Image: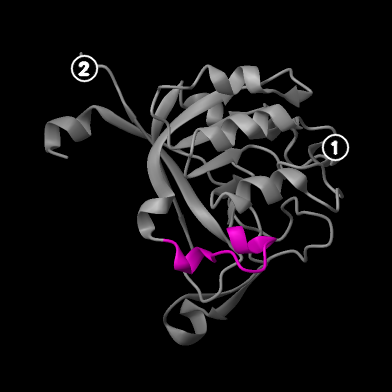
């Protein structure tokens, strides 16, 4: 990218900041951020971070639910980069195949689902009643051979749903799932997505820094 091209790009942060009072999937322990060293006592700052691999804006690896599938550290870096299309499903209780079929032929590598649920972040309502994929939607997602999907809710299955069928089908196809995204309404219809997870051995999931890069019209 040269300087002229860079001037016509903008970025949108799609990531929730980690802190001890953030919404968490039921049963997940809150993150702990504590002073390991301080300027006052040690002349430098260092923070100790303790959190679950599925905290905040994070990526589910295929190995999250499937015993022989790949972990995040086994996936090449290009898995987490690509062209993304935003699917606006605000006002829907179920996300159906009709929304997916509109994207066919657009060359998307990721589909990002804008449900509007991020407006409930920090409320009890964030955990309840958010729209999820029906079987026809998952069929269409699988047919597109994507790198992954992202969503601005806690999960692509209902909270407390033990079987998690949508997870199993999508992860079983080798895709990744990005959950608890934000600011999807500020992207437009498409962008370049960069969602790089923390790198650690046998990663079933990891928090990531997800960013959209958007080409702006030249003036």
What secondary structure is found at the residue carrying circle 1?
Answer: loop
What secondary structure is found at the residue carrying circle 2?
Answer: loop
Quarter residue 215 falls in: top left
Instruction: Give the percent coordinates (x, y) of residue 3.
Output: 13, 37
Span highlighted in magenta in the image: 62-75
State which quarter of the image contains the N terminus: top left
Q: Is residue 30 left or right of residue 201?
A: right
The residue sitting at 76% across, 46% down in the picture is 165
* Nearer-the-camera pick, 46 or 29: 29
Judge whether 80 appears above or below 152 on screen.
below
Judge whether 132 appears above or below 164 on screen.
above
Residue 34 is covered by the magenta coloring = no
The answer to whether residue 100 shows anywhere in this view is yes
**Label for residue 128?**
1
Residue 68 is covered by the magenta coloring = yes
Q: Earlier in the sequence, mark 2 or mark 1?
A: 1
The residue sitting at 62% across, 38% down in the picture is 151
Q: Which residue is mark 2?
A: 218
The residue sitting at 39% across, 30% down in the picture is 191
The answer to whether residue 183 shows anywhere in this view is no
Instruction: Give the percent coordinates (x, y) of residue 79.
Output: 42, 52
Instruction: Give the percent coordinates (x, y) of residue 160.
Output: 87, 50
């Amino acid at each position: 990218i040269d300087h002229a091209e860079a001037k016509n790009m903008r970025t949108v942060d799609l990531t929730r900041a980690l802190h001890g009072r953030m919404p968490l999937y039921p049963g997940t322990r809150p993150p702990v951020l504590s002073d390991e060293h301080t300027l006052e006592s040690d002349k430098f700052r260092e923070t100790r971070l303790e959190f679950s691999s599925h905290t905040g804006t994070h990526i589910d690896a295929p190995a999250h639910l499937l015993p022989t599938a790949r972990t995040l550290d086994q996936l090449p870096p290009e898995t987490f980069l690509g062209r993304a299309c935003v699917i606006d499903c605000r006002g829907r209780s179920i996300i159906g195949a009709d929304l997916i079929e509109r994207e066919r032929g657009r060359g998307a590598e990721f589909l990002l689902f804008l449900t509007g649920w991020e407006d409930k972040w920090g409320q009890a309502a964030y955990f309840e009643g958010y729209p999820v994929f029906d079987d026809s939607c998952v069929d269409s997602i699988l047919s597109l051979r994507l790198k992954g999907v992202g969503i601005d809710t806690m999960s692509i299955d209902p909270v407390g749903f033990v079987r998690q069928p949508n997870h199993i089908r999508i992860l079983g196809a080798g895709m990744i799932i990005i959950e608890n995204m934000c600011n999807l309404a500020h992207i437009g219809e498409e962008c370049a997505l960069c969602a790089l997870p923390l790198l650690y051995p046998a990663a079933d999931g990891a928090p990531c820094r997800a960013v959209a890069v958007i080409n702006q019209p030249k003036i």
